Image (cartoon, helix red, strand yellow):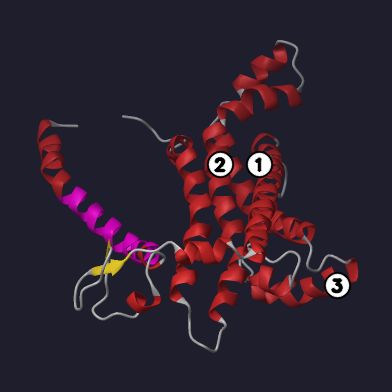
Amino acid sequence: MTARGQAHGDRAAPFRAALLAAYALISMAPVFYMVVTAFKLPADTAALPPRFLPGLSAPENSLWFRFTLGNFRRVLSDLETLRYLFNSVFVSVISTALSVAIGSLAGYGFSRFPFRGGRDALFFVLSTRMLPPLAVAVPISFMYSRLGLLDTRFGLILLYTCFNLSFTTWMMKAFIDEIPAAYEEAAMLDGHSRLEALLRVVLPQAAPGIAATAVFSLISAWNEYAFALTLTSTDAVTMPVRIHAIIGDNSGVPWGPLAAASTLFLLPIVFFGLMMRKHLIRGVTFGAVKG
């Protein structure tokens, strides 16, 4: 980079930082308001103008609201809500692990063993994700009814694994393409089998890509609503369906408990993203050319 170009980049840096800060502020404003609402009393949730700051009292026409944990106690005291939260954790984690494991193997096969029609087959794998969930909800419900998989965690795990498999296959193929085949060839010359070379050489090199793929797959399974609503009724209900059920009350929307349940639902995926942030940043930039 020339000195002139570097100077121009330095002058543009504050503008880019301000633009990113404004974007982050706008994007996080609804989340911030949801979290704040989770700590409000019912009277404060409907106050005008809206109140944003916690306190012990709430003077009229002020930004202060009365801080309370009652909404969280109400949600956590509901054993059904805790069971539905467990269902979301169990189904999302297991389906993510399966889809990433199978997708890694499939991506490795497409990357290392090209064959006639391979690109068409890879596109066919991706095309399974193009259908909107509601378009296949009825035939899947019929099949699940005949197989006895309705309202079961196993049924949701199977469906989420298949639904995410196209995404994980494409992602892992792209990451494995960036790993030189000479690495595993050297391992096989040392006496390792193809599978051992994959497990000991390729997958450790692709760890950032696996982490990034796992994060996106977990978010997809964690937030899925259409299939969970259609295929469950009592035993395997997940939190997105439960949160929607909180709204379905003719006496009015209980904004405080609704916000508290949404905040609790948000926390696990945020913690997982924070735990994987280093790998995630490396994964999304995997294979980039460094200057």
Residue extent of the magenta highlight: 15-35
How far is mark 1 from mark 3, CA to CA? 32 Å
Check disc 2 and report the residue beneath it.
Answer: 174
Determine the residue positioned at 64% across, 69% down: 131
Q: Are marks 1 and 2 in contact (CB under 8 Å)?
A: yes
- How many residues crowd mark 3 within 10 Å: few (<14), some (14–19), many (20+)? few
Does residue 30 belong to the magenta stretch? yes
Vertical side of 21 occupied by 245: above or below:
below
Q: What main secondary structure does the magenta stretch of the protein show?
A: helix
Which residue occupies the foreground of this view, 289 or 234? 234
Check disc 1 and report the residue beneath it.
Answer: 107
Vertical side of 184 occupied by 282: above or below:
below
Determine the residue positioned at 85% across, 72% down: 145
Vertical side of 191 occupied by 160: above or below:
below
Q: Specify the amino acid type for callout 2.
A: Ala
Q: Are marks 1 and 3 in contact (CB under 8 Å)?
A: no
How far is mark 3 from mark 2, CA to CA? 37 Å
How far is mark 1 from mark 2, CA to CA? 8 Å
Please tell me which of labels 3 and 2 falls first in the chain: 3
Q: Position of residue 235 (x, y in %)?
A: 76, 65
